[in-house]
Amino acid sequence: MVKTVQTATVTKTKPLVAAVQTNKRKKIGILGGTFNPIHNGHLIIAEQVLNQLGLDEIRFMPDFIPPHVDQKLALPAKERVAMIHAAINDNPLFSIELAEIIRGGISYTVDTIKNLRQQHPENEYYFIIGGDMVEYLPKWHQIDQLIKLVRFVGVKREGYPVQSPYPIIWVDVPYIGISSTLIRSKIRHHQSIRYLVPEAVRAYIKEHHLYDHS
């Protein structure tokens, strides 16, 4: 069963004894995005970052209104969340963070991380972004404050420099040229998306006739 975090609290309990015996901070990776739809590229990134950095968990965090995405192309949050559920259902180390969906409005990362840290000061957060996004960090909302609240993980990408004025933990991940834009285009042109998305996601899209006219 997929874990869903609705108030930044994972729906999974741990024995009290274990909590008392350790003061170790839980290392949580956050992969944010519109996930319109989620695809195998997202899952590969999440698995590689989890493994290479020794994180305890990866949370997929769909945004409510992304500040830089044309909303005419995005499905309602309900549909995008359902596809994430379908995609990660078989991985106990993957879960969904619904903080931005619940809060509503434009999804600024700095606001989200502030809320998560206030509610769960015992966690250490690692925010995962693609190498192509690293160069845009200076334009992020309140980036100077955000960089003090979270560790950024940059996924290396060919053609983009591995450097930034901000501290970045770089991770090598096999580049898979899959994008949500590509998947929507293939659906619109009645082409196969098999092996581009998890089979459960493909079945959900087909059953609900998503993106047929996007």
Image: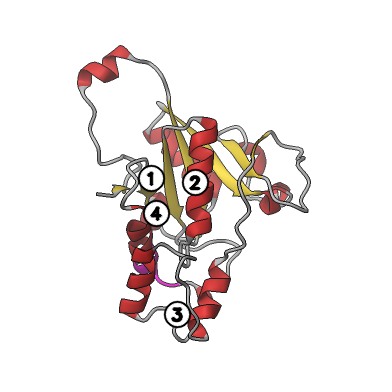
The residue range painted magenta reads 75-80
| Sequence-first tag of 4 and 3 | 4
Q: Nearer the viewer, mark 4 or mark 1?
A: 1
Distance from Cα at disc 4 to Cα at disc 1 = 22 Å
Pointer 4 or 1: first along the chain: 1
Compare marks 2 and 4 and give the one earlier in the sequence: 2
Compared to 169, does 154 lie above or below? Answer: below
Q: Residue at x 69, y 47 (%)?
A: 134
Residue 183 visible in the shown view: yes
Q: What label does residue 211 carry, if any?
A: 3
Under mark 1, the amino acid is Phe
Q: Are marks 4 and 3 in contact (CB under 8 Å)?
A: no
Cα separation, mark 2 vs mark 1, equals: 8 Å
The residue at the point 48 percent across, 38 percent down is 50
- Real-space Cα separation, disc 3 to disc 2, in angstroms: 25 Å
Label 1 secondary element: strand
Coloring basis for residues: secondary structure
Q: Is residue 204 left or right of residue 68?
A: left
Please give the label number shown on residue 94. Answer: 1
Q: Which residue is tagged 2?
A: 46
Label 4 to label 3, Cα distance in Å? 26 Å
- Compared across the picture, whether 134 is left or right of 161 comes to left
Q: Is 209 in front, or is 101?
A: 209
